[in-house]
Image (cartoon, grey):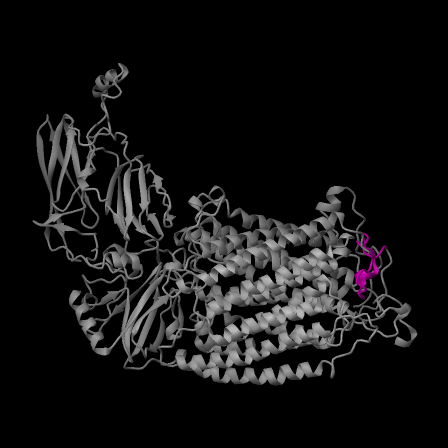
Amino acid sequence: MTHATVAGAHGHAPPQGFLRKHVFSLDHKVIGKQYLDLALVAVCTGMVLSWLMRFHLAWPETPIPGLAKLSPNGAAGGVITPEYYLSLMTMHGTIMVFFVLTTAPFAGFGNYFLPIQVGAEDMAFPRINMMSFWVTLVAFLVLISAFVVGDGPPLSGWTAYAPLSAVGKDAGPGQGVGQTLWAVSITLFCVAQLLGALNFVTTTLDLRTKGMSLARMPYSTWAWFITSVIGLIAFAVLMPACILLILDRVAGTSFFIPAGLVISDRLQPHAGGSPLLWQHLFWFFGHPEVYIAILPGFGIISHILPVFARKPLLGPRVLIACLIAIAFLSYTVWGHHMFLSGMNPFSATLFSVPTLVITIPATIVTLLWIGTIYGARLRFTTPALFCLGFVSVFVSGGISGFFLAQPSIDTYLHGTYFVVGHFHFVMGVAAMFGIFAATYFWAPKMFGRMMNETLGKWHFWLTFIGVYCVFMPMHYLGLAGNVRRYSAFTDDYLKPLIPLHRFITIAALCTGAAQLIFLFNLIRSRFRGPQAPDNPWEATSLEWSTTSPPPFDNFGGRPPVVERGPNEYGIASGARGMDYAMQAAAAPVSAR
Amino acid sequence: MTLPPAFFRRDAPMRTHSVLLPATVLLLGGPMLIRSDVVGAPAPGGTITGKVTYTGTPPKMKPIDMAKEPACAQAHAAAPVMTENVVTGPGNTLEWVVVYISAGDQGAAPATEPVRYDQKNCQYIPHVAAMDVNEALDVYNNDPHSHNIHPLARVNPEWNKSQPKGAPPIHTTWEKPEFIPVKCNIHPWMHGWFAVLTTPHFAVTGDNGTFTLAGLPPGKYTVTAWHEQFGTQSQDVTVTGSETKPVSFVFKATPY
Amino acid sequence: MGKLFAVVVTIITVVSTAIFIAHTWWLPPDISAHGPAIDRQLSETMISSGVLFVLSQLALALFAWRFGDRKDGRRVKPFPGGATPMVVFAAVLVGAEILTLTLVGAKVWAGVFQTPSDPNSLQIDVQAEQFAFYFRYAGPDGRFGATHPELINEASENFFGLDPARDTSARDDIVVPTLTIPLNRPIALTLRAKDVNHAFYVPELRIQQDFVPGLTIPLHFTATQTGRYEIVCTQLCGLGHYNMRAYIEVLPQAQFDQWLKDKAAQQ
């Protein structure tokens, strides 16, 4: 259905009062910004945790100033205990994957821009949308409360393998209330994401304005749409898995716990469960989850790169086909996290095939971006730099995946820093670069103010060089057999690798410090930046056809009529000397 | 620093009429005249003394291979540490038996010296530490790596705590009497016991199997001997004055 | 700015590739019978992915250098052939490499994990627990005693929960924290977990396998060089995970036989 709704048909009256306008708002734009603010708080928290971890790995016996006051149990005397390190690691992973990488590119920017890009007034279900945000916020608060309750945060990693996560407090510090809070938080997060995904799918299918066929949708909208379909299935599996985990912990069930386990000198009162069942359920969610984290980034880069290349994206239909192929394949590969898990080894070979096959559409989209900048007239603004940087780091991260996808090689590299380097490149760096590109690109539209270009460029260069210094060496560590998730390197063969760890730590702290530039730029520009015009980047999609920021109902009561796709850049004979044609402008007679 | 087991005994019960005289002296300004922390100061009263032995064949103690912690493996390279769940001495004596007054006693006097528990070269020293309820316990890590002490208490709250290299000692107390097995979460061979008692009259046998409970006012007492593997035995003893009453315990040992 | 980007990307590419090629940090020498096949698979993947890595990064750098907007009014150029060369390159060249690596790699993998152990193997029972490995040999009677989780008593070193009082086959079982094996002899391990997931990893042996509570998992290999190497746990198992290690000692056959005799005498 491609009709536009009559203004106000699904709509709601303009909000009155501070609470309705800025706190309990039904407006997808406010909700999008709320998600982005939550992700900002989350990423700062997650980053501080990573600094503590890296410092401890490099200088395990050096007290960290102030930490003893903050964490008298976890860091008596300022030195992080082994269990506290693992708790920091668990919370770092959980916060970053869920509350940053799933929240910012998808819930944050998607909520703000999907309705506008399809020409709608709001999401299909504004109330459900508001509820999604508040449930996400409650999930975050529940998770953070693990820092201050009971025995501290869980230490089983963001992957929470059973039975370590399932038997309760016998399994170790943090595995009491902390782990239960973790499971509750993630259950709530799943609920919120499922509701959000429903909104995205319905809005995309039903609320497109007149002339906005599916083929004419911007690539970011396509990516958000495909991501939400992935999410509907993935989160629908994680949620019951977490509920089963909670039941094992508090209700005496044994979904994931077999008989005969002796933990803390106690024979555990469970029987009949399977630890591998948790791994299958978790990774059936977990692999699509990493595509949920990166696919919006693909869409954002595909959306932004042509703007600053001043030429159309190469092969847009091929891009969409590849995104759909990646989404479909993402459900067939989860076992590559489990090659050595004890599942039937023949399954490993089966899983490795689609895992390697996914390389093909991923290579194609990367080559499409590189082909887009061929022959371009690149404008090296900050968002453009982050797009180019995205391509570089995604190549680096994707290539290391090529090794891990093969079970014979994974026999050596599994559980080492090679894996840590790989997923940080694709998630911690590439997806973050997508978020940065989106922020610098869309800040003028969201806040009506331009961000500072000089500060932006400094942020880019320090970050780009910094992340390579942090994460490329991890591949070398992995090849040397450096095991991951260790709170200290006391093995004979690991001690010689500590100098490289120190280098990584120093790079990480410097790169972290560089993010202060971004934070300063963002906060200052949001309130005091120079005024932004409607279309500062000369882009084509519908968000640039309205004011900066858009009015309450996005288009001032006049839904746009779309006459072309989003890819009209580099036009020799554009109207009024423009080298581009906006989606909503009237098309020149010759283009018909 | 290894403290001999005979160190762990208390000699000063608090009974009302025996408090009046020292209290008067104190009030009259003689705070320096009485020091309650002088251990071994002879107190009036009877003494129960004896020996703990076994019959039968005890299990062979096994050498502990600490290979996974190289610093500790090296420290014991010349003479490996043996398991300590059944330690015997010449003459079929039994070590690490806690002998204490389990009935007839008036209660514990607060001690002023904390009980010290050391983690050294991946061993708990002493293997069995006896103490009173609410008595201070200090746990030290003397090793160049982390330990995580885990008292597996069932009556008292169960806890565990990591001490990285150079960490400060853990100060703690126990509220209820209990025999608490202690393990290290990081080094599976490290095992010990906290014997938390409500009496100041207790002793832990050394390799000569002997124990002495002194300073007992006249009365009927039940003396209990506890061994971690061979169980508990009790005997009733009556003390009439300041005599020394002999009591012996014989445990049945089995090889498995 | 475009030129700066190109230079930075080129430097990063050259430096990181050089470090890979120089083997500055690299795998330790292989000591296993199946290791060379894994190392070959790794080298082949290194080369093909290295080529792809270098080509894509340098293409990115080159285009960023050349195609900045010089405000000279030139028209943008589409990529010659459009999207088709991209699809063809990926599907055909990358696809062919993937196919080759999959077919060869599947055989390497099957050789380690999908073939049964040699019937002549030395059988060793392995238990992983928080936070140590213990290894059990059958002793002179050639039979492993039954294990009973409720009988586990670490204070008396009964890590496997054996019942020597009633089970005679358990009395001569040899339990040690160091995996001592003879050179050039097939070894068949049986992996069991006492409490949570663990893993067995020896980089030099090119072997790794998770322990799963409730499962009994076989693992076999043959060591081709003597020496002392580390076994480390690679599956997060709790606070002592970083300290969970054991040593593996590969001895010449005669020395191993003597070691086994000495140990049997001590039981």
Q: Nearer the viewer, residue B66 or A469?
A: A469
Q: Residue at x 18, y 49 (%)?
A: B230
Q: Measured along the vertical axis of the image, is residue A114 above or below residue A573?
A: above
The image position of residue B110, as x and y in percent, is 28, 30
Q: Which residue is at the far right?
A: A589
The answer to whether residue A81 is magenta is no
Quarter holding the N terminus of chain A?
bottom right
The answer to whether residue A542 is magenta is yes
State which quadrant residue A534 falls in.
Answer: bottom right
Does the image show residue A289? no
Q: Nearer the viewer, residue A201 or C40?
A: C40
The image position of residue C105, as x and y in percent, is 47, 81
The image position of residue A227, as x and y in percent, is 65, 66
Left or right: where does residue A272 sit relative to residue C86? left
Q: Which residue is at the far top?
A: B28
Q: Nearer the viewer, residue B29 or B170?
A: B29
Q: Nearer the viewer, residue A338 or C78?
A: C78
Quarter holding the C terminus of chain A?
bottom right
Q: Residue at x 17, y 69 (%)?
A: C262
Does the image show residue A483? yes
Q: What residue range appears in magenta? A: A533-556
The image position of residue C139, as x and y in percent, is 20, 71
Left or right: where does residue A110 sit relative to residue B240? right
Number of numbered labels in the structure image: 0
Q: What secondary structure prevails in the magenta region?
A: loop
